[in-house]
Amino acid sequence: MEDIIIKSSDFKPEDSNLQQLLLEVDEAGYKYAIIQDKSVKLLGRQSSYPFSEEHDLFETSFAQIKVSLTTKSFTFLPEIYFNPTLENKLKAFINFDNQHEKIFESLINKIDIRSVYAFKDSQIKEVETLLKNPTLYPQFLPFYTGATQLAAKTLHPEIFINLKKEHLEVLILKNGELFFYNIFEIKNKEELKYFIMLILQEKQINAKETNLKISGDIQLDSIFFKEIDQLFTDCTLIDDVPYIRTDENFKEVSIHQFFSLLSLYLCE
């Protein structure tokens, strides 16, 4: 995808002490945003080289820095069943690598679900070497948090998918709450279709009666979208994030590409 950087008409770098830096790092490069007073002041995407090689912006002192990192080592369990004595069992369950990873856990707000996950030491070092006091989040937390803001909160399941360069995230909400989440490595449209159909079958969901909202690195004219659109009757790109404002400078931006990034704003 084309690299971009867009600024609002009233962006003031000198106000960094009042701003949040949001950063999403994955195999496709990185995306970043600066937020102030619930408004996007700067939005950028870089796919040609790692963010650690770039740039003066990240050396600025922000009021808060939130970073989303990709992990496939995670699990969820009801808070009522969580206690520290389970740590070794959970580490084994997510195939935790004690020599090269660090374990984390956090409570998903309002639904009493505990997430346990691991980041590679190399991921943590890359971020903490360049940024000042960043807060790290696994990719599923902003995706889930943003999706709950768009969910209809009906008894019927709603499906959200987020496409990255080599990965597919699938999130299912039921009554506005977490019902299913997983991330899959995909290389082509056949694998994309296979994983979606597998989930529909396992969760006994009728695609023709289910809303699907799409975000990430995908366009309406792409073969991936056309493949998905054949499965679902109601299939749309997420073109609005109601919890963040943008001015006229961002009117040509495909907001769905930045949905997960901007949803970091909601993470606590």
Image: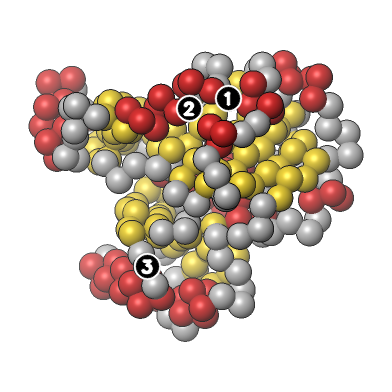
- What is the CA distance from the residue labelled 1 to the residue labelled 3? 32 Å
Q: Residue at x 26, y 29 (%)?
A: 101
Disc number at residue 65? 1
The residue labelled by disc 2 is 127
Eye-nearest disc, 2 or 1:
2
Q: Residue at x 53, y 32 (%)?
A: 52
- What is the CA distance from the residue labelled 2 to the residue labelled 1? 11 Å
Callout 1 touching callout 3 (CB < 8 Å): no
- What is the CA distance from the residue labelled 3 to the residue labelled 2? 27 Å
Q: Amino acid at mark 3?
A: Lys
Q: Position of residue 134 (x, y in %)?
A: 51, 22
Could you say which is closer to the camera, residue 227 or residue 171?
227
Q: Residue at x 41, y 48 (%)?
A: 177
Q: Position of residue 126 (x, y in %)?
A: 45, 28
Q: Position of residue 122 (x, y in %)?
A: 36, 30
Colouring: secondary structure
Label 3 vs 2, first from the N-terminus: 2
Label 1 vs 3, first from the N-terminus: 1
